[in-house]
Image (cartoon, grey):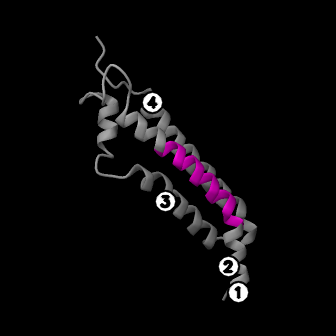
Amino acid sequence: MSSPAARTSALVRAAGPILLVLVVGASCAGAVRHLCLAPGPPVDRPVPGTPRAEHCEAYAGEDPWLLRIAAPAGAVLLAAAATRARKHALVWLLAVAISIALVAEALVIDSQSWAPTV
């Protein structure tokens, strides 16, 4: 059984990867919310049937903050708790991979058209 000091040490080691995921997740959640709710002139919302509108519909009932901050940070925290000190690089690898996925999704939404082109 691990001691309280060992558990605390694992959480301290996980602080960096969790902070990375929290910062990237918050930034991406804000970007996705803005891209879905305020695409810019000449429309107020993405036009239904466009790629961006379909992507944003997937999050219609969901809270982007929860999906992009709490879930990824929880995954990193669980990975940190499950790994030993020697495997700390795996926790960082997971945090970087999650961060890249979050940024990639925001970039995909940004690249999608929000209104039909003529």
Q: How many labels does the image show?
A: 4
Q: Residue at x 41, y 41 (%)?
A: 33
The x and y percentages for residue 93 are: 65, 54
Q: Amino acid under label 2?
A: Arg
The rendered magenta stretch, by its main secondary structure, is classed as helix
Mark 2–mark 1 contact, CB under 8 Å? yes
What is the crowding at mark 2: few (fewer than 14 residues within 10 Å), some, or many (at least 20)?
Answer: few
Q: What residue does disc 4 label?
A: 110
Above or below, 74 relative to 98: below
Badge 3 density bin: few <14, some 14–19, many ≥20, Cα 10 Å: some
Q: Which residue is painted at 32% across and 19% down in the image?
A: 42
Residue 14 lies in the magenta-colored region:
yes
Magenta residues, start to end: 13-29
Q: Is residue 40 left or right of residue 95?
A: left
Q: Residue 70, labelled with which disc?
A: 3
Disc 4 + disc 2, Cβ < 8 Å: no
CA distance separating discs 4 and 3? 23 Å
From the viewer's perspective, is residue 13 above or below residue 8? above
In x, y percent, where is residue 66?
43, 56
